[in-house]
Image (spheres, helix red, strand yellow):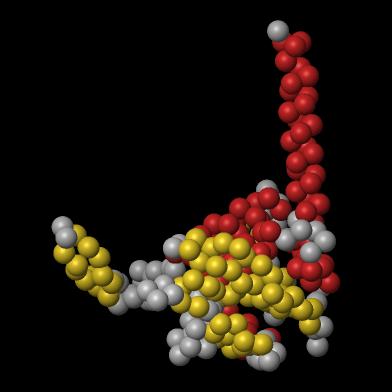
Amino acid sequence: MLIASVPAVIGFLAARSLARARLFLRYGFLRGLLAPYSRVQIITPSIEAAEFAFARDGLRLTARAPKNVLFMPMAEARAIAQLIDLLRKVDRKATIELVAAGAQDPRMPTFSIGGPSVNPYTEGVLDAVFPDFRIEYPEAARARWGGMTFEALYNASDELIRDHGFVFVTRTPRHAPCVVLCGVFAFGSAMAVEALAGAGRKSPLAALFRSGEKGFVAVEGRVIGLETVDVTVEVCRILPLP
């Protein structure tokens, strides 16, 4: 019986090794970016809410929140979970740290989740490195860059049904990789991470990361309830470093 199980074990190990090799090939553009480092940081978005509403016993109530109890958009929390899963696939031994804006280490590879309204680190990177990009929320549900407009859409029930996400590739002040993933709304941030996770090794997005230059990527997708679907890359530009 033991001898009979040997081929099955060998087959399982071979299949696992093949799957791992394919994963390494697919995400080689990220492995190359992060290979010199043993630690990666993700800068999280947050919202300070002085008051929030909740339901109990059929009543709608409000409660105060302490200043150091912060909230995070659900779609961006999901984006962080997906990004962590992706980074684990790229390097299972890497230490992944979640930090708030202002506590980041510029010597570490940095992924910043969420737009300027919820993440001051993102705001600083966009202002300094991508000054032509603007998200016009809350005045309008759109972003602009390079003469292009990225408009989010609502339905008649005032629900978001289409959002745009953005990936910005640059370097920290200490020359470590820096990737900002945000959207017009929080669903766009999730779409940006989804596009990164779905990129193949021959995709324009992978070529951008391998180039070592700074870059801009815009994606769009539909929103159904709390889910994002049909996410596609609209724009992928390599922007030579100054």
Q: Which residue is depicted at the point 19% across and 68% down?
A: 61
x and y percent of residue 177 in the render?
72, 71
Vertical relation: 234 (above or below) 25: below
Q: Position of residue 16 (x, y in %)?
A: 74, 36
Total label count? 0
Does residue 41 appear anywhere in the picture? no
Q: Is residue 123 left or right of residue 170?
A: left
Q: Which quarter of the rendered picture does the N terminus lie within?
A: top right
Residue that lies at the very extreme toward the front in this rendered image:
156
Q: Residue 217 at what x, y percent from top left?
A: 70, 75
Classify residue 23 as left or right of residue 117. Answer: right
x then y, percent, for residue 223: 51, 66
Q: Of 168 and 219, which appears nearest the observer? A: 219
In the rendered image, is residue 207 in sight?
yes
Q: Quadrant of residue 68?
A: bottom left
Identified at 45% across, 62% down, the residue is 226
- Of residues 201 and 32, the one nearer the viewer is 201
Q: Is residue 37 above or below residue 220?
A: above
Q: Residue at x 78, y 54 (%)?
A: 26
For the point 72% across and 61% down, the residue is 199
Depth order, front residue of 14/204: 204
Quadrant housing the C terminus: bottom right
